[in-house]
Image: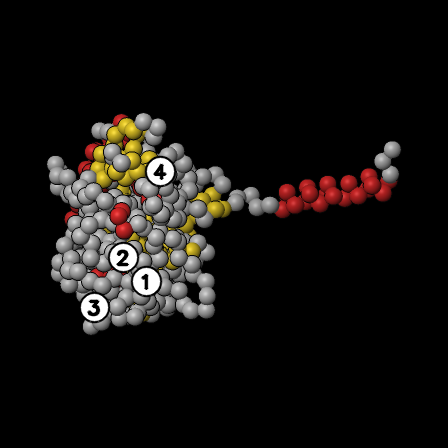
Amino acid sequence: MMSQRRFGFLVVMMAIACSLLIALPAVAESNVRIVHLSYIDGDAQVNQGNQDQDFTHAVLNMPVTAGMWLYTPNGGRAEVQFENGSTVRMANDAELQFERLALADSGGKINTIRVDHGIVYLNFDKVSNDDRITVNVGGKSFRITKSARLRVNADEKTATVAMFHGDAMFDGEQPLELKGNQTVSLDASATGSLKVVKGAEKVGSDSWNKDRDNDLSLLASRSSQNPAFNGYNAQFSSLGAYGNFYNVSGYGNVWQPFGMMPGWDPFSNGVWGLYPGMGYAFISPYPWGWAPYRYGQWNYQPANGWFWAPGSNFNTFNVGPSVGAVPAGWRAPMQPTASGGTKPARLLVVGNPPNVHPAILTGHAVVGARPDTHPVAAGMHIQGSVMPAGTHPQPGTMPRRSVDTAQAPATHSPATMRSGSPSMSSSPSMHSSSGATVGTGHPKN
């Protein structure tokens, strides 16, 4: 028979367990989000959370995480894409912060965006009942509860919100429902009701926002014609324009990019980006370089070369190289470590990656505590747009003068290096020829 002491102990433990269950929050959140920088034209710069700390030149396809600031100086433009294809686009020296990027236990996406200044387009075409989208601008806050398209134009003192489609709810002492084809002016210092006018004044960057819609529609149409894309989300939409799907025995439908020469491998060119709490993540700046480096794995066959198998898990993403079958003697690039007493580099270059800001290649990724104001030279702009219909683009062939690049640790076999890349080495160092570690210098005037 159980003793009274033991029985009493079990009762107490059960009571404690029940109290802990009751104390659990009703809604748990996760920071596992799959958001990325999908387009850069000109210069874009990022900051991992503190606006007063150093900004770094951004890299196409870099993951966007909670707390990150994004800035487009000197007329640069940028686009951030969410899991469902919704986008945030920036023009006219815009600066914003993704204050929250979280996932509720219901599956709803929690997005809080703070617009500091500039022109920002918010294109949320798919909003579920569980999503929570909040925008902070001009001392005010508004919520997007269903599909909406709008433009925010802010400066230091005032802001306007032009609603093209959908509606938004302004909370606080001056509640307001902003509807389609309406514009509201915001002034943090003003009192009284918010001023709403009918219509939305056109600005020059509106045409670019529309062009980007057309580009993405073109990509989606090419993808929808290929049955291999059935069931894939918007993050795979660019693959139909930049490569082919075909069937490989033992792997199923796999994908391979157009225009890659013999000897090319998917990890010979790229950038390691440092993320607090996650370490270094491998970033591929090819125009198609998001999904194939975040999901599935790369494989190699002598008859086919390198190809990408998508896999079936799209709820988390790969941080470093994910490979299956590889050539004899080939090893993936090593993930750098951020430990030690010295300040770790924000960006580390592998090989000679395409579509990156020239300052990154020369070891001057960090631009200082305030965003850089030196323009990017014409012809050196980073292009993330698609090629004209009917063409087969060759990713990574943007013309650029040869430079001595700082290198991240890598252990590729020299035989697998793409020929004609002057900056590649089988035993690269962590420094450029000038001795400056990537990510710790400043641009030269």
Up-down relation of residue 38 to residue 76 (above or below): above
User: Which numbered mark, 3 or 2, is in the foreground of this view?
Assistant: 2
Measured as percent of width and height from the top left, residue 314 is found at 39, 38
Q: How many marks?
A: 4
Please tell me in which quadrant of the rendered image residue 307 appears: top left
Tell me if residue 220 can be seen: no
* Quadrant position of the C terminus in the picture: bottom left
Q: Which one is nearer the viewer's eye here, 305 or 167?
A: 305
User: Which numbered mark, 3 or 4, is in the foreground of this view?
Assistant: 4
Secondary structure, mark 2, is: loop
Tell me the residue that label 3 is attached to.
374
Name the amino acid, label 1: Ser
Q: Kindly report the distance in space between the C-alpha atoms of the residues bearing marks 4 and 1.
A: 27 Å
Tell me the residue that label 1 is attached to.
429
Measured as percent of width and height from the top left, residue 434 is found at 26, 71
Coloring scheme of the render? secondary structure
Q: Earlier in the sequence, mark 3 or mark 4?
A: 4
Tell me the residue that label 4 is attached to.
325
Tell me the residue that label 2 is attached to.
425
Q: Earlier in the sequence, mark 3 or mark 1?
A: 3
Q: Kindly report the distance in space between the C-alpha atoms of the residues bearing marks 3 and 4.
A: 45 Å
Q: Kindly report the distance in space between the C-alpha atoms of the residues bearing marks 2 and 4.
A: 23 Å
Q: Residue at x 20, y 42 (%)?
A: 262
Q: Earlier in the sequence, mark 2 or mark 4?
A: 4
Q: Residue at x 42, y 42 (%)?
A: 316
Left or right: residue 98 compared with residue 208:
right
Name the amino acid, label 2: Ser
Please tell me in which quadrant of the rendered image residue 288 appears: top left
